Image (spheres, rainbow, N blue to C red):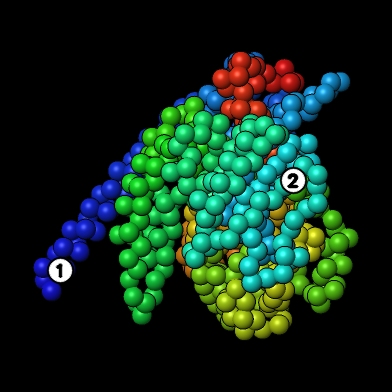
Amino acid sequence: MGRDYKGRLSAYRCIYAFIFLLSACSLTSFLLYSGRCTSTPGRGQSQEWEAAGLKPNPSTSSRPTIHLLSFQEAWNHLNFPPPAGRPRRRIMRIAVFVKKWAHASRAGGLERHAFTLHLQLAKMGHQIHIFTTSPTNASSSSFSFPSLPTLYFHFSRPTAAGYLDQSTVWNQFHAENSSGAGPFDVVHTESVGLMHTRSRNITNLAVSWHGIAYETIHSDIIQELLRSPEERPAHSLTDRVPKVVEEVKFFRSYAHHVATSDHVGDVLKRVYMIPEERVHVILNGVDSEIFRPDFVAGKEFRRKIGIPDSKSLVLGIAGRLVKDKGHPLIFEALKQMIDEDAEFRESAIVLVAGDGPWGNRYRGLGPGSVIVLGPLEQSQLAKFYNAIDIFVNPTLRAQGLDHTLLEAMLCGKALLASRLASITGSVIVSDDVGYTSPPRVESFKRALYRVWSDGRQVLEKKGEVGRQRGMVLFTATKMAAAYERLFLCISSIGKGDGENQCQYKDPSW
């Protein structure tokens, strides 16, 4: 037993040493990144950034023309307006690999990203071919299959583990790629929809990452710290480092990488050692036609679900109601506040939208304190956001960029979220748009009491500032325009017009 303990201790020491080295890399890259942010913005975009509370973007300031593949910040900061007075850019044939297509009300972040982005590109006239698994155990009517003449689906049976059958989709891809319509201009895979063993020889390919193993180490550490004495220690930390090493090895098989947060873009370049010209940051975006301020709809939603006028603070929580989304943490914080503070109990109420095992536990806090709504369609979800005063996201998952934060922001709501690098680096960048908290019960209690103390007037102001920022960075049209330009750039390389498509000049210069 003693030898086993010493061996385990030695393994943990190696892991923590490795994590320390990776963290040092990230710190160094942050300092280098910060050092670049010292120049003055161009005339046109500076006013837009200032209105949204953004820092000037250095790369558009000192040079009126830049090479996009060398651009190191989020492409959402750039403007890609449709051509005026002439036909729009050439129409592309785009192949998309995604493990699962979006369910109407239960889509995860990756599926929602795939749906929003490629629907927008199809509306822009591009021919989008979706290679995905066929719906199982549910009516296909509950999945979102828009009827557009430029959107094509190629279904296949999933593997036993639920992934795309690589042999089948590869044959489907080659059949369509060699059809009379001509080869695809670009290939896009959502995470490892198309495995690296198939992608290694495709030069006109881009992969969007919605979570990488390095980020997951942070989540594992948080969950280990939150583990109760009765729970058995998880072995995820010991398993995670080899997965990071494995990813570092095979990520180079993808030609171009799209990071959905500023933090991941930095990790891909510094820790995964992918050349900077192959890493591009394009932040997630959501439909601003659906998610927008609507006071009347919010007031009607409150009346419909029975929120009394005496409630001076309406907190909102949405998403998958599972452990790794932080629901045990926020549940305990709210439970303590409801139990110990009668004034808070009488004046505040929590709305919970989503599906998962923690739904019933929230109901146990009492109908006067919590209303659990279940999963909501997007149109109803927009009304939900408009009915609340602040959106709370206690996630423990450090991966990707959570869509619910962006949806609430575009509806003009203040935010409270876990203090994770992807969130503080891209979304809640200052106190002007919301609050962040370390993922601990006592910290979230303090943050919630501060929200309650600040009151609606302060929250409304933060929501206004957040919406201004969101309309600059986080709309579906801004995201799709950035992806379109990236796809045009990488598809044109080697065709003689790569320099033209990959050059950017600020249209407001």
Badge 2 crowding class, 10 Å Cα cut-off, few under 14, some 14 to 19, many 20 or more, is many
Residue placed at 42% from the left, 41% from the top? 251
On screen, residue 255 above or below 131: above
Quadrant showing the C terminus? top right
Q: Is 137 above or below relative to 470?
A: below
Please state if 245 lies on the left or on the right of 277 as rendered.
Answer: left
The residue under label 1 is 4
SS of the residue under disc 2 = strand
**Quick one: SS at disc 1?**
helix
Q: Residue at x 54, y 46 (%)?
A: 170
Q: Can residue 60 be seen by looking at this rendering?
A: no
Image quadrant in which the N terminus is located: bottom left
Q: Measuring 55% from the left and 35% from the top, which residue is drawn there?
A: 205
User: Residue 219 at what x, y percent from top left?
Assistant: 44, 58
Q: Which numbered disc, 1 or 2, marks the residue closer to the eye? A: 2
Q: Residue at x 72, y 74 (%)?
A: 373
As shown in the figure, which amino acid type bears the numbered disc 2?
Leu
The foreground one among 101 and 111 is: 101
Using the image as rendered, state which of residue 313 and residue 120 is in the foreground.
120
Residue 175 appears at what percent x and percent y?
Answer: 61, 42
Q: Nearer the viewer, residue 279 or 308?
A: 279
The residue beneath circle 2 is 151
x and y percentages locating residue 69 in the rendered image: 55, 25
* Residue 468 placement: quadrant: top right
Where is residue 343 shown, x and y percent of the image? 67, 76
Please tell me which of labels 1 and 2 falls first in the chain: 1
Q: Is residue 41 visible?
A: yes
Residue farthest along the left direction in this orientation: 3
